[in-house]
Amino acid sequence: MGESRGGRSGPPTLRDVAERAEVSAMTASRVLRDDPRVLPATRDRVRAAAAELGYRPNEVARSLRRGRGTGLVGLVVTNLANPFYSRLALGVDSVVAGHGLKTVIGNTAQDLDRERELVDDLVARRVDGIIAVPAGAEQRHLAAAAAGGVPVVLASRPPEGFTADCVLVDDFGGARAAVRRLLARGHRRIGFLGSPPAVHTGTQRLRGYAAALREAGVEADDDLVRLGQTEPAEATRAAAELLALDAAPTALFCSNNRNTIGAFRAIREHTATIALAGFDDFELADVLGLPLTLVAYDSDELGRAAGRLLVDRLGSGQEGQDAPARRTVVPTSLVEYGS
Amino acid sequence: MGESRGGRSGPPTLRDVAERAEVSAMTASRVLRDDPRVLPATRDRVRAAAAELGYRPNEVARSLRRGRGTGLVGLVVTNLANPFYSRLALGVDSVVAGHGLKTVIGNTAQDLDRERELVDDLVARRVDGIIAVPAGAEQRHLAAAAAGGVPVVLASRPPEGFTADCVLVDDFGGARAAVRRLLARGHRRIGFLGSPPAVHTGTQRLRGYAAALREAGVEADDDLVRLGQTEPAEATRAAAELLALDAAPTALFCSNNRNTIGAFRAIREHTATIALAGFDDFELADVLGLPLTLVAYDSDELGRAAGRLLVDRLGSGQEGQDAPARRTVVPTSLVEYGS
DNA sequence: CTGTTAGCGCATTCAA
DNA sequence: TTGAATGCGCTAACAG
């Protein structure tokens, strides 16, 4: 507990511990790293000295010296408040923590500039690897990081313009399955609510929607497709507009949980019965008092899979730098709520 | 783009840039930090060289050299999947990012050992400060960090056994207000569902509940109090048990959103009408089809306030190290849903 | 088993 | 305006 080192400032260093224990810095270093080649008596003295000074090894200096990275994994997401991303984060952390790595989470708030800065900063801080859910199709910053030797794994979006490992959800198949189910129930006018066009998952889910319609011989109607809603309130407005059309849809398919929740509120205010389906499961979906078909998948697993890809790549060391890129797809399933 | 440095390994360093630009490392350093005292011509040469090599300053070396910290703020939470914590995290980040600081989020999964390791690791990595929501009453690791000169701010729990800035929610007042409202509606047997006793917020909210009962002259009944539920499923079971009592409660008060959601499911399966109130607002609370009184507060603001306290303490520099600890309280309000 | 030498990549200090 | 020397805190590589 005693802070006393001739008035020097800042936290105690290895030398301080060494002096106090009357050994060289090297020996102190060995003790504190549990190197066995130290006499038990010396070891105890060093340990005591460290404890008395409240010594904490400086991890910054340590990584600089060792040169093999910092033991940190950077995770870049657009919106931590969305349970999808927080689950993903926990999945990543659960895997990498098992390999002695810490997760640094960066939130971009959908801002591309911020995303670029964040990635650059992670590289500058010498993280061992980066897992990212890029906000847009512009991925030059990630490509640069990868080119600079930092392993990059993409989650929920494929790499654009460079190669990297990635974990995807079966966006196309999941959306198609959900829309097929609406079609099987006799719906022919099915609306689509989705994220901005630049978002990969949204595009794929729209493709799945279109494919299901085509297979069923239903002509697509662009008036029934509304893209660009990010928050439930926007989705509620968009859904209300669709429901107010002369040729209004009898069912809605939403490309993510924000849109599904928004659409739910619009339907709730509406007189006619509208069927609802959407991508992403969410808490309390079962108690909305409305039949609801959701495309569910394990978002923790998405994170774990991404973590595994990264850890594998790190583990394979120098020689594994240019192993072929791997792509994992997380399956989806349909869940029926509400009855 | 060209990687070419006589076969040296690893990313390019300042010296590499300097050599390529035919200047000293010092000059290169100045250019890359936008030091104005460099001839424009030289500056351009250095910039070009850096770009060609794909140079990224090594932030690890930089912080070691400067000695004034890493520009990182450590945030320690128990469960990122809980919206409360992800909001808190965003609030913190929004404030500290404005001061050039990055947030490192660590998730403890309610594990005290993991929390201790995490804090130690953050200290070892020389973060500039730590914001924590400790899982239990045991805070020696935080006290040690604070004693070691790392500013610590607690969120949602007060420091135990040491002094530190903190941001609290008005747990006592919020709970009392909610229970008062149930009492005003004529309820006399009111059950309580809460987190494990070690959690500070749970204890305070229980105190608020008890105080409201006492004021109203209602005798407290320990049989109506169930502590220890962390997940909705556990809360559902606990609520069902209360509702099955001979002298069953006519209303339930829950000390957090996990318990409220769990209790909701139990009440939904129950025949009699049970009034429900709880601490924490949550998404879709308005559509549960049940009258619901919630204690709401701004959890982003909780994070922002914590960020502000930390930034203030950092800003005041050396001399502010032992400024008196500050305590901020975030107010609560009652929200009525369902009708 | 212990110590000495050297240097990771960068920026502060001083001198030119 | 530029550069040379020096050291942040720590640890490989080599002595002893």
Image (cartoon, coloured by chain):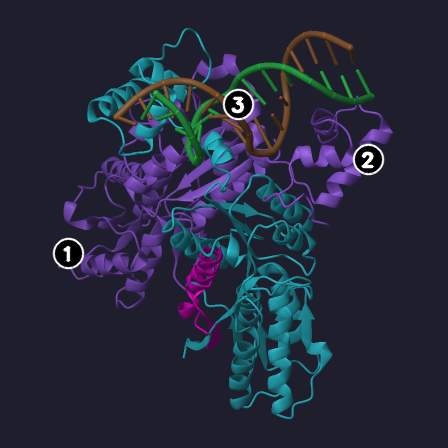
Chain colours: A cyan, B purple, C brown, D green
Residue positioned most to the left? B246
Find residue A282 and name its label: none
Give whichever of B312, A26 is nearer the camera.
A26
Which chain is indicated by disc 3?
A: B
Which chain is indicated by disc 2?
A: B
Find residue B247 and name its label: 1
Real-space CA distance between mark 1 and mark 2, rounded to the nearest whole angstrom: 84 Å
Looking at marks 1 and 2 on the same chain, the residue that comes earlier in the sequence is marked by 2
Q: Residues within 10 Å of mark 1 (few under 14, many from 20)?
A: few
Q: Nearer the viewer, mark 1 or mark 2?
A: 2
Q: How crowded is mark 3: few (under 14 residues within 10 Å), some or many (20 or more)?
A: some
Give whichever of A252, B83 is nearer the camera.
B83
Does the magenta run of residues contain A216?
A: no
Tags 1 and 2 both on a single chain: yes
- Residue B146 lies left or right of residue B269; in this view the side is right
Q: Residue at x 37, y 24 (%)?
A: A26
Read off the magenta span.
A284-313
Does the magenta run of residues contain A288?
A: yes
Q: Position of residue A259 (x, y in %)?
A: 58, 66
Looking at marks 1 and 3 on the same chain, the residue that comes earlier in the sequence is marked by 1
